Amino acid sequence: MLLHLSVENFILIPQLEISVHKGFTCITGETGAGKSILVGALSLILGQRADTSVLRDKSQKCIVEGSFLIDGYNLNPIFDANDLDFESTSVFRREINPQGKSRAFINDTPVNLNVLKEIGERLVDIHSQHQTLELNNATFQLGMVDSYAGNSLTLNSYRKLYYEYNSLKSELDDCTKREQQSANEREYLNFQFDELEKANLKPNEQQEAEEELEILTHAEEIKSRTFAAIGIMADDELNVTGKLLEIKQLLDQASRFSHHLLPLAERISGSIIEIKDIANELRVFSDQVNFDAERIEKLNLRLDIIYHLEQKHRVATVPELIAIMGALSDKLFTISSLETRIAELKEELTKKESELLEDSNVLFSERQSVIPNIETEMHKVLENLGMQSAQFKIKHERLSNFTAFGTDKITFLFSANKGGEIREIQKVASGGELSRLMLALKSLVLNRSLLPTILFDEIDTGVSGDIAGKVGSIMRNMANHMQVIAITHLPQIAGKADSHLLAFKQDEGSTTVSSMKILSSDERINEIARMLSDETITESAKITARELLNYKN
C-alpha cells in the first residue's frame, strides 16, 4: 500500500510531499492541473523508463521517492532473490540526472529497472484509459481469465516448457538447414578426403623423394666423379695420401732439430686419417648409387601424386595437405554429428511436446472451470452499474498449435441490450460501456488477488449521472480489500471517496507549477460543488455536494 510520495523537479512539480491513506482516495482538479503527473511520478518508481524530458529544471536531477507498506503480500522471496533487505515499510527511489542517467534504489540499495519493475507490478496496478482499450485485445482477455483463476503457477510451468520447446525447435530447424546444405557437399568432401587418405602422405616424403630422384637420375655422373675423387685421394700413383705421408716423414726428420715442428707433423697425420676416411665413405656411397629405372619411375609417380594434390588444393607442402585432410575430417564429423543431433532433438521435442500438451490441458481445464463464475459475477456487477439487460459471455476455444499462453483462445462477447446480438466486445461496446466492463472485470479479478493498490486514471470516461455513482460504489467496495486511488472528473465518484486530493496549478514568478493537497471537509464540499457547477459555485451545488458526501447541514 502506498503511504507517502515525494517528488522533486518532475515536469511541473518543483517539490511535492503527499501522504495517501488506505481505503478509497480520489484525485480531482481542473483540466491541465497536473492530476496525471502523479501517475507519471509513481510510474517512475515502479520501473518505467524515463529521460531528461521529465526534468522541470534541466540543470537539476529529478527525484521521486515512495514509501510502501508491503507486509503480507508474499514479497519476501523476491527481496531474498535480489539480496535486498525486506522491511515492512520499504522505500523506493528513482533519480534522473541532467545527463539522462537513471538510478533506482529499494531501501537505499541500488537495483536495476527490471527488479524495480518486477516488485512494482506486485504493488500497484495503474489502470489508464489506454488499458481500457486493451479490453479489445485477445491476449488481455485471456490474462483477465488467468488472473481470476489464479493459475500463475500452472502458466509459469507451461511457459517454461514452451520456451524450452521453442528453443529446441529453433535448434532443430537450424541443424536441419545446415544438414541439408552439408548433404549437398558431403559427397565431394568424402571424395576429397578419400583421395588424400589413400595418398597415405608422410610429412617429409616429398623432400626425401626429390633428393633420391636427383641422385638416381644422375647416378653415372655421381659414380664417375666420386671414383675420380677417390683416385686423387688414395688410389692414383701420385695420390694425395702418399704425398702427405712424404710431408709427414720430412717434418718428423726436421723435428729432431726443432720441437716446434712436432704439432705440425701430428696435424698432417690427422689429415691423412681424415682423407682416408673420406675416401672409404665415398667408396661406400658410390657402391650404393646405381641407376634404377624402376625406382625412378616409382618416385616420379609418387611425386606426380603429391604435385597434383598440392596444385589441386593450392598449397606447396605435404604438411599443408595433411592439415587439409584433417579439416575435411572435421567437416565430415560435423555433418555426421548433425545427423546424430537431429535425431536427439526430434526425440527431445517429442518428449517436450507431450509435457506441453499435458500442461496445456491443465491450463485449459483451469480456465474452463472459472468461466461460468466470471460470467455470473459479471452479470451481477454490470447490473449494479446500470446495465440490467447486458449480456456477457466468454467464448473458449482450443487452438491446434501451442502459443506462449497455452492452446486456448478466449473471446469476450457482449451485448448491452436485451435481445441484442451478442458479439465481440470491440464490435459492439461504446466508450462508456468499455469503461464499465473494464471496471467490472477489475473488481472481480483484484478482489481475488494480493495486489495492495490500484490507481484508476480517468476510467470513468463516457460515464455520467446515476451510473457514475454506481461506478464510485464499485470502487468503494474494492477499497474494502485494497487501496484504491482514482483520478476522476465526476463528482459522484469523488463523493464516494474516503479522502480527497486536489491537483492545482499556480503561477510562481514567470513559471507555472503544479501541486497537490489533501482537502478538509469544507474544502471537499467546495471542490465537488465546483465540479457540479459551470462558472460560479452555487448554494444548490454545495447542497448537492453535501448530499454526495453524506454530510449533514
Image: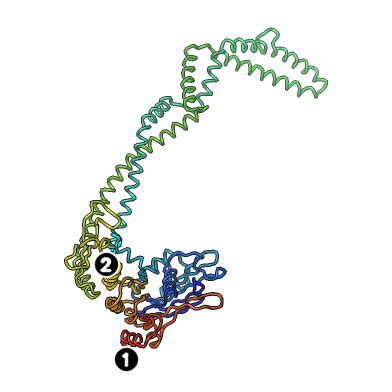
The residue beneath circle 1 is 552
User: Does residue 67 appear in the picture of this structure?
Assistant: yes
Amino acid tagged 2: Gly
Could you tell me which secondary element the residue under label 2 belongs to?
A: loop
Q: Quadrant of residue 145?
A: bottom left
Q: Position of residue 409 (x, y in %)?
A: 24, 57
The residue beneath circle 2 is 150
Q: Which residue reaches farthest front?
A: 535
Q: Is residue 217 left or right of residue 523?
A: right
The earlier-in-sequence mark between 1 and 2 is: 2
Q: Position of residue 116 (x, y in %)?
A: 42, 67
Q: Position of residue 374 (x, y in %)?
A: 22, 68
User: Does residue 288 appear in the picture of this structure?
Assistant: no
Residue 453 or residue 424, whichever sits in front: 424
Q: Quadrant of the C terminus?
A: bottom left
Q: Which residue reaches farthest bottom?
A: 553
Residue 278 or residue 422, whichever sits in front: 422
Q: Is residue 22 left or right of residue 239?
A: left
Residue 256 or residue 106, whichever sits in front: 106
Vertical order, 458 against 299 (above or below):
below
Q: How is the image coloured?
A: rainbow
Q: CA distance from mark 1 to mark 2?
A: 44 Å
Image disc number at residue 243: none
Rendered residue at 72%/15% (across/down): 244
- The number of numbered badges drawn on the structure is 2
Residue 116 or residue 209, whichever sits in front: 116
Rendered residue at 35%/74% (across/down): 453
Please identify, in this view, whether the residue under mark 1 or under mark 2 is nearer the observer. 1
Q: Position of residue 84 (x, y in %)?
A: 43, 70
